[in-house]
Image (cartoon, rainbow, N blue to C red):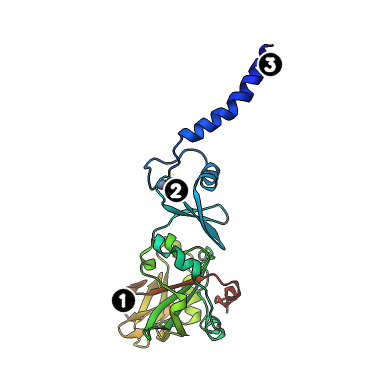
Amino acid sequence: MKMKFLTLFKLIFKPLDKTIFFRRKKITCKSCKTTEPGGSWIDLVNQVRHFYKKGVQFDFGTIYYCPNCNQPWYLDHNDTTLSYVHDSSRIEEWMKLSNNLTDEQKNMFFEIGATPLDFYEYGKDFIDLPCKVTLINEQTLDFVLIRLQKDPPFIYSEPCYNEYITIDKVVKIEPSEYTLNPELRLQTCQAREIRMCFSPTRVIGSNGVQYLLNGVTNFFYQDNIKGSELKNVLKSDAKYELDLVEQHCNFKVKYIIGHWDESLVRSRIANF
Ligand SMILES: [Zn+2]
């Protein structure tokens, strides 16, 4: 008799208790509550899916809004990352953005060669093309990285994403004189120490001066020497002054962002 009463009690109160728990619990996010939400990662993902307001669904993830403060968050399609949306005013732009690259523009990816993955295969979700572009407003930019990416640009806080341009503003893509030759781009990308922020590659300019490129994988411009004028040089040939050249020290690279295009993965520079 006692057991039966207990079972009955559990049947009545367990679901009721759950309902009360969720009604009482205020669903929040990191943005509106300073304390970390408790529970496992899976609990958090489930909470987002069930209690947040679902927004736009992209190919590689979905926008969800915190029911308490309305802050948008981006949950990627693998449920591995929940990212803060830094600029919600650009959500609609990303939704409406069509790559619509012309055949001529696509061919430039193969002619110039997209940047290879680094030694640790970082960059798998990006197709990066260092190039020169002409925009719709007829402005020409010599230091441009066209980046086709899976996740939306407004979840990244890196300074390079400040005021990024979308790919639909590009009329023409051309090789840039400031880009390193493909062999050097492969060599600098595959430097084993690249994650340690010290991965020097020795090069020589047409002025006879040698430079150590450190983390420089796309563009170079120093002492009036452009990236395309650099050649690889062996350590034993050292005769001149050596400068350690850090990435983006003499120029600003503009990021132009578009959606991922699987057909252009093959345009990444591979082994020679
Ligand atoms: Zn919130």
Give the residue at mark 3. 4
Residue type at tag 1: Asn
Mark pair 3, 1: CA separation: 79 Å
Report if the beta carbon of the residue with label 2 is closer than 8 angstroms to ligand 1: yes
> At numbered mark 2, what does the secondary structure look like: helix, strand or loop?
loop
- Residue 143: quarter of image: bottom left
Give the position of the C terminus as an image quadrant.
bottom right
The correct choice, above or below, for 113 with respect to 50 in the image is below
Q: Is residue 22 at all visible to an observer of this figure?
A: yes
Residue occupying image coordinates x 46% and y 35%:
25
Residue type at tag 2: Cys
- Does residue 65 appear to the left or right of 242 in the view shown? right
Residue 250 marker: 1
Residue occupying image coordinates x 53% and y 46%:
45
Q: Nearer the viewer, mark 3 or mark 1?
A: 3
Residue 66 marker: 2
Residue occupying image coordinates x 54% and y 83%:
102
Q: Earlier in the sequence, mark 3 or mark 1?
A: 3
- Looking at the picture, how far across and down is residue 53, in whole percent? 49, 50
Residue 78 marker: none
The reply to whether dot 3 and dot 2 touch (C-beta < 8 Å) is no
